[in-house]
Image: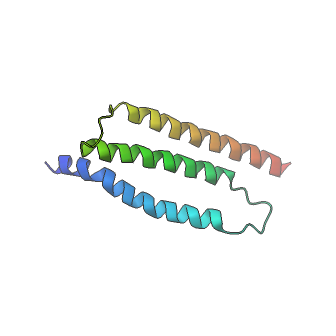
Amino acid sequence: MIAESLSQVAPIYNLGFVIIIIFLFLKLLSTPIRDKRVYLLPWKIIFFAVTIYIVEEGLTVLRQLDVINVPVHINGFFELIIICTFIYMLLLQKEHLKKTKS
């Protein structure tokens, strides 16, 4: 019974936490860059992954409220996109570090 209620409320709490994360990302991306060595592209890519997560959680909440009828397996596609963006971000960071060392 407790597990069922937590599984129903968890996506709503996740969206609440994402609001805090969006605020922190906007603060990070709006700060003026004074140093040319600052590399913000990976953070922008992570922000894209967070927006995909917001869409996924929004669909989950709307599905639980019976507002829309979307199959559950669609969440796997969103998670695949998120994982691919994280891998791409890590590869970009690796290349940037190689360039700065040499």
* Residue 15 horizontal/vertical position (percent): 38, 55
Report x, y in % for residue 23.
51, 65
The residue sitting at the front extreme is: 67
- Residue 65 is left or right of residue 24, and the answer is left
Q: How many marks?
A: 0
**Would residue 69 appear left or right of 82 to someone viewing this image?**
left
Rendering colour mode: rainbow
Q: Extreme left residue here?
A: 1
Of residues 70 and 101, the one drawn nearer to the viewer in this rendering: 70
Residue 77 lies, with reference to residue 47, above or below; the image says above
What x and y, as percent, mark residue 66? 24, 42
Q: Is residue 60 left or right of residue 21?
A: left
Viewer-closest of 88 and 59: 59
Horizontal and vertical percent position of residue 87: 60, 39
Residue at 31% of width from left, 47% of height from top?
61
Residue 34 falls in image quadrant: bottom right
Q: Is residue 81 above or below residue 24?
A: above
- 39 sits to left or right of 27: right
Question: Residue visible at 31% across and 45% down?
Answer: 62
View extreme (right): residue: 102
Residue at (37% x, 48% y) in the render: 58
